[in-house]
Image (cartoon, rainbow, N blue to C red):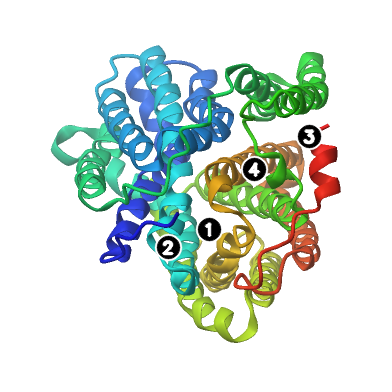
Amino acid sequence: MRNEQRSNPWVVLAVVLAAEVMDLLDATIIAIAGPSIRADLGGGTAFLQWLAAGYTLAFAVGLVTGGRLGDIFGRRPMFLAGAAGFTLMSLLCAVAPGPAWLVAFRVLQGLCGAVLIPQGLGLIKTAFPAEKLGAAFAAFGPVMGLSAVCGPILAGVLVDADLFGTGWRMIFLINLPVGLAALVGAALVLPRTGERDPGLRLDLPGTALLGGALLLLVFPLVQGRELGWPWWCWAAMAASAPGLWLFRRYEQGRVRAGRSPLVEPSLLAKQRFNAGLVVGLIFFAGLMGLSLIISVYLQIGLGFSPLRAGLTQAPWAFGTALGAVAAHGLSARLGGRKVLVGGTGVVALGVAGLLVTLAATGGSASPWPLLPALLVLGTGMGASMAPYFDIVLAAVDEHEVGSASGTLTAAQQVGGAIGVAVLGTAFFSWGGRGFTGSLERVLWLELGLLALAAALCFLLPARAREEPEEVDEAAVATVAG
């Protein structure tokens, strides 16, 4: 049942977005701040890898379970618990005395984020009436993209400013006022009813199977290049497929026995939702990978300082906001799928612009020639993300929201890990051509990923407010065994 408290749905959205921003900033700031952290705390290159990898791994493997916890115990209590834990871990990261402590706190921070983030989509669906969901999600998606792009900018500003002598520690301390504000706001305005199913039980064996299978996939993707791709990395990735199969078989057994599964079988039977997962995985693989590569190119290839590298990407962030605003009105007139495909095309136009700029300038050390293409790229990114969540979640029923939110966000995180691994490997493997030549090759790969994502978008509904998708009973039976 939908919550009757709708007096301040936009305040609910603001609270959810504050938590999303806090999480996404922490996921992206390490690319810029990592060298400064290492210079202060010591540690080798593996320490830098684990600063990002520890958070990503914990976040990715915990997301589906985090979403299910919201279904079982209520999305509001889980949001509060996740926000409190995330804020506390941010404080502990800021005061970490050594490399091992900081990595440990980052892992715990990722687990708290896995509890916090999946609740956001469900809370928005609960707080808003159906006719206003499109407007809510139009803000939700672009803020995520904007935060991901602004992370390096904020990190560069904070590290260079050295506020109160805190240096890199301020990138974690900045979470304290945001986290406390989110906690107070959540306690005051988040919906209390229509969000909990007391008949559900947490599937701990299923959680372990799914977490293990994702760990086998994500760990070698994140660490493989740094380790030189030893044989066990390939063996682990290969083992993830039978691990996922074992998870599916176990879940089928739970359904037959009348017990609560970790992922709803009816959700897996919805072709449009599954298509949305694949589109998100490919789209975020390309964009998150490209964001990291451009940051590396500006700092290592062109010798920019962290602040200069971050500011060079400001048009990307500005374009993301601009595209999101334009996409909201266009989605109402044209349908979300057309805007999603069109936005992906604009991203491709921006990537093509970067290729033309690099060819024309030969890798000039000036940031100015790159700015127009980055603006176009960001505009397409904002336009694409604005309708994405609304379309993918259109056919999800209320009892599936937690499971769907965790699964959807997990797909994005795994996609981001794949993108960083694939594009990062391509960039550094082709270093013999110079950094500019390597970036050009990466941009061609990015165009291929965008073309594939745009083609798969046609499997999604044209509009999010269409009639809910009918579940194929035969498909449900197949999923359930």
Q: Position of residue 283 (x, y in %)?
A: 67, 55
Mark 1, residue position: 365
Circle 1: element type:
loop
Quick check: marks 3 and 2 in contact, CB under 8 Å?
A: no
Quick check: marks 4 and 2 in contact, CB under 8 Å?
A: no
Give the CA distance from mark 4 to mark 2. 27 Å
131 above or below 293? below
Given the image, on which type of amino acid does mark 1 rest? Ala
Sequence-wise first label, 2 or 1: 2
Q: Which mark is residue 314?
A: 2
Sequence-wise first label, 4 or 2: 2
Give the CA distance from mark 1 to mark 3. 57 Å
Q: Residues within 10 Å of mark 3 (few under 14, many from 20)?
A: many
Is 20 left or right of 60, judged from the image as shown?
left
Given the image, on which type of amino acid does mark 2 rest? Ala
Sequence-wise first label, 4 or 1: 1
Q: Which mark is residue 480?
A: 3
Residue 293 visible in the current orientation:
yes
Q: Nearer the viewer, residue 312 or 210?
A: 210
Name which residue lies at 33% across and 60% down.
4
Name which residue lies at 43% across and 60% down.
143
Rendered-image quadrant of the N terminus: bottom left
Residue 301 visible in the current orientation:
no
